[in-house]
Image: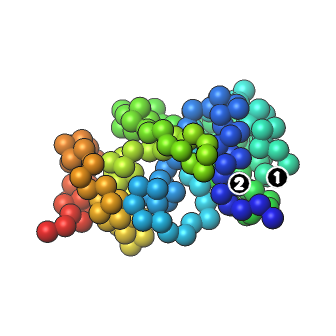
Amino acid sequence: MASETDAIRRVLSALQESVIEYMIVGSYAAALHGFVRTTHDLDLVVCLLPEHVSTLATSLGDEFYLDTESALTAIERGDMFNAIDTNSGIKVDFWMLKDDEFARMQFSRRRRIDFEGIPAYIQSSEDTVLSKLLRYRITPSDRQLSDVRGIIEVQQDRLDWDYLRGWARRKGVDDLLESLLPG
Protein backbone atom coordinates (compact mmCIF):
# COMPACT_ATOMS: atom_id res chain seq x y z
CA MET A 1 0.00 0.00 0.00
CA ALA A 2 1.36 3.42 -0.98
CA SER A 3 1.97 5.98 1.74
CA GLU A 4 0.72 9.56 1.76
CA THR A 5 4.30 10.70 1.12
CA ASP A 6 4.46 8.47 -1.98
CA ALA A 7 1.17 9.93 -3.19
CA ILE A 8 2.38 13.49 -2.66
CA ARG A 9 5.62 12.74 -4.49
CA ARG A 10 3.53 11.38 -7.38
CA VAL A 11 1.42 14.56 -7.48
CA LEU A 12 4.48 16.82 -7.42
CA SER A 13 6.11 14.77 -10.17
CA ALA A 14 2.91 14.89 -12.25
CA LEU A 15 2.79 18.68 -11.93
CA GLN A 16 6.40 18.92 -13.07
CA GLU A 17 5.84 16.52 -15.97
CA SER A 18 2.78 18.53 -17.02
CA VAL A 19 4.70 21.83 -16.66
CA ILE A 20 2.10 23.24 -14.26
CA GLU A 21 3.22 25.98 -11.89
CA TYR A 22 2.06 25.47 -8.31
CA MET A 23 2.81 25.99 -4.65
CA ILE A 24 2.04 23.92 -1.59
CA VAL A 25 -0.21 25.85 0.82
CA GLY A 26 -2.39 25.12 3.84
CA SER A 27 -1.60 22.55 6.51
CA TYR A 28 1.33 20.97 4.67
CA ALA A 29 2.97 24.36 4.19
CA ALA A 30 2.38 25.20 7.86
CA ALA A 31 3.88 21.87 8.94
CA LEU A 32 6.93 22.33 6.72
CA HIS A 33 7.50 25.86 8.11
CA GLY A 34 6.51 25.14 11.71
CA PHE A 35 5.53 22.06 13.67
CA VAL A 36 4.41 18.83 12.03
CA ARG A 37 0.79 17.91 12.57
CA THR A 38 -1.43 15.23 11.12
CA THR A 39 -3.36 16.11 7.98
CA HIS A 40 -4.78 13.90 5.28
CA ASP A 41 -5.05 16.43 2.52
CA LEU A 42 -2.68 18.48 0.43
CA ASP A 43 -3.65 21.95 -0.74
CA LEU A 44 -2.02 23.38 -3.85
CA VAL A 45 -2.46 26.70 -5.61
CA VAL A 46 -2.01 26.07 -9.33
CA CYS A 47 -1.78 27.97 -12.60
CA LEU A 48 -3.86 25.51 -14.57
CA LEU A 49 -5.23 25.85 -18.08
CA PRO A 50 -7.93 23.62 -19.61
CA GLU A 51 -5.35 21.95 -21.85
CA HIS A 52 -3.39 20.83 -18.78
CA VAL A 53 -6.20 18.72 -17.31
CA SER A 54 -5.88 15.61 -19.47
CA THR A 55 -2.08 15.67 -19.17
CA LEU A 56 -2.34 15.95 -15.39
CA ALA A 57 -4.88 13.12 -15.20
CA THR A 58 -2.65 10.90 -17.35
CA SER A 59 0.44 11.77 -15.28
CA LEU A 60 -1.36 10.94 -12.03
CA GLY A 61 -2.43 7.59 -13.46
CA ASP A 62 -5.04 5.11 -12.33
CA GLU A 63 -4.00 5.40 -8.68
CA PHE A 64 -5.77 8.77 -8.51
CA TYR A 65 -9.42 9.54 -9.00
CA LEU A 66 -9.70 12.88 -10.82
CA ASP A 67 -12.96 14.02 -12.42
CA THR A 68 -11.79 15.97 -15.48
CA GLU A 69 -15.17 17.70 -15.89
CA SER A 70 -14.94 19.04 -12.33
CA ALA A 71 -11.41 20.22 -13.04
CA LEU A 72 -12.50 22.07 -16.18
CA THR A 73 -15.41 23.67 -14.32
CA ALA A 74 -13.07 24.76 -11.52
CA ILE A 75 -10.74 26.40 -14.03
CA GLU A 76 -13.64 28.21 -15.67
CA ARG A 77 -14.98 29.45 -12.31
CA GLY A 78 -11.60 30.14 -10.71
CA ASP A 79 -12.51 27.66 -7.99
CA MET A 80 -11.03 24.34 -6.86
CA PHE A 81 -11.23 20.62 -7.61
CA ASN A 82 -9.62 17.61 -6.03
CA ALA A 83 -7.97 14.32 -6.79
CA ILE A 84 -7.94 11.36 -4.41
CA ASP A 85 -5.23 8.74 -4.18
CA THR A 86 -7.10 5.44 -4.12
CA ASN A 87 -4.26 3.70 -2.26
CA SER A 88 -3.50 6.06 0.64
CA GLY A 89 -6.77 8.00 0.65
CA ILE A 90 -5.02 11.37 0.63
CA LYS A 91 -7.07 14.13 -0.97
CA VAL A 92 -5.33 16.79 -3.04
CA ASP A 93 -7.16 20.08 -3.45
CA PHE A 94 -6.14 22.10 -6.51
CA TRP A 95 -7.02 25.77 -5.97
CA MET A 96 -6.85 28.04 -9.01
CA LEU A 97 -4.52 31.03 -8.59
CA LYS A 98 -6.70 34.09 -8.03
CA ASP A 99 -6.15 37.14 -10.19
CA ASP A 100 -5.55 39.76 -7.52
CA GLU A 101 -2.51 41.60 -6.24
CA PHE A 102 -2.17 39.63 -3.01
CA ALA A 103 -2.49 36.21 -4.68
CA ARG A 104 0.02 37.13 -7.39
CA MET A 105 2.43 38.49 -4.76
CA GLN A 106 2.20 35.28 -2.73
CA PHE A 107 2.79 33.15 -5.82
CA SER A 108 5.83 35.21 -6.83
CA ARG A 109 7.30 34.66 -3.34
CA ARG A 110 6.97 30.87 -3.30
CA ARG A 111 10.10 29.00 -2.30
CA ARG A 112 11.74 25.94 -3.80
CA ILE A 113 12.40 23.14 -1.35
CA ASP A 114 13.32 19.47 -1.45
CA PHE A 115 10.33 17.28 -0.61
CA GLU A 116 11.46 13.71 -0.10
CA GLY A 117 13.97 13.94 -2.97
CA ILE A 118 11.72 15.91 -5.33
CA PRO A 119 12.03 19.64 -5.94
CA ALA A 120 8.82 21.31 -4.83
CA TYR A 121 7.42 24.82 -4.48
CA ILE A 122 5.92 26.00 -1.21
CA GLN A 123 4.21 29.16 -0.07
CA SER A 124 6.59 31.39 1.91
CA SER A 125 6.46 31.32 5.70
CA GLU A 126 5.09 34.86 5.82
CA ASP A 127 2.37 34.14 3.29
CA THR A 128 1.42 30.94 5.09
CA VAL A 129 0.99 32.97 8.29
CA LEU A 130 -1.14 35.55 6.45
CA SER A 131 -3.25 32.87 4.75
CA LYS A 132 -3.86 31.10 8.05
CA LEU A 133 -4.91 34.38 9.71
CA LEU A 134 -7.26 35.18 6.82
CA ARG A 135 -8.75 31.67 7.02
CA TYR A 136 -9.24 32.15 10.76
CA ARG A 137 -11.22 35.35 10.11
CA ILE A 138 -13.55 33.39 7.81
CA THR A 139 -13.78 30.21 9.88
CA PRO A 140 -12.36 30.57 13.40
CA SER A 141 -10.37 27.49 14.33
CA ASP A 142 -7.73 26.97 16.99
CA ARG A 143 -5.87 24.81 14.46
CA GLN A 144 -5.23 27.87 12.23
CA LEU A 145 -3.85 29.86 15.16
CA SER A 146 -1.79 26.92 16.37
CA ASP A 147 -0.23 26.65 12.90
CA VAL A 148 0.62 30.37 12.98
CA ARG A 149 2.18 30.09 16.44
CA GLY A 150 4.29 27.15 15.25
CA ILE A 151 5.55 29.01 12.18
CA ILE A 152 6.40 32.10 14.23
CA GLU A 153 8.21 30.02 16.85
CA VAL A 154 10.28 28.05 14.31
CA GLN A 155 10.85 30.80 11.73
CA GLN A 156 10.88 33.91 13.97
CA ASP A 157 14.37 35.20 13.12
CA ARG A 158 13.95 34.39 9.41
CA LEU A 159 10.57 36.07 8.88
CA ASP A 160 10.34 39.28 6.87
CA TRP A 161 8.48 41.22 9.55
CA ASP A 162 8.04 44.37 7.43
CA TYR A 163 6.31 42.35 4.70
CA LEU A 164 4.29 40.34 7.22
CA ARG A 165 3.08 43.34 9.22
CA GLY A 166 2.42 45.41 6.09
CA TRP A 167 0.21 42.80 4.45
CA ALA A 168 -1.44 41.91 7.78
CA ARG A 169 -2.47 45.57 8.10
CA ARG A 170 -3.69 45.72 4.48
CA LYS A 171 -5.71 42.50 4.88
CA GLY A 172 -7.15 43.47 8.28
CA VAL A 173 -5.50 40.73 10.35
CA ASP A 174 -2.81 42.80 12.07
CA ASP A 175 -4.63 42.56 15.41
CA LEU A 176 -4.59 38.75 15.17
CA LEU A 177 -0.91 38.70 14.22
CA GLU A 178 0.10 40.96 17.09
CA SER A 179 -1.94 38.91 19.57
CA LEU A 180 0.05 35.79 18.63
CA LEU A 181 3.51 37.28 19.02
CA PRO A 182 5.56 36.17 22.01
CA GLY A 183 6.19 38.63 24.83
Q: Could you say whether the residue bearing mark 2 is in a helix, strand or loop?
A: helix
**Relative to 7, 34 lies left or right:** left
Please tell me how crowded label 1 is: few (under 14), some (14-19), or many (20+) other residues with Cα within 10 Å: some
**Relative to 122, 101 lies left or right:** left
Mark 2: amino acid = Ala
Residue 143 appears in view: yes
Across and down, in percent, residue 89 comes to: 73, 63
Residue at x 78% of width, y 38% of height:
59
* Image quadrant in which the C terminus is located: bottom left
| Residue linked to disc 2 | 7
Q: Could you say whether the residue bearing mark 1 is in a helix, strand or loop?
A: loop
Mark 1: amino acid = Glu
Across and down, in percent, residue 120 comes to: 55, 41
Q: Nearer the viewer, residue 70 or 48?
A: 48
Across and down, in percent, residue 122 comes to: 48, 44
Q: Nearer the viewer, residue 143 or 81?
A: 143
Give the vertical position of 48 relative to 129 (above or below). above
Q: Nearer the viewer, residue 23 or 100?
A: 23
Residue 137 appears in view: no
Residue at x 56% of width, y 52% of height:
43
Give the vertical position of 70 relative to 18 (above or below). below
**Relative to 58, 38 lies left or right:** left
| Residue linked to disc 1 | 63
Residue at x 81% of width, y 64% of height:
1
Q: Residue furthest right?
A: 62
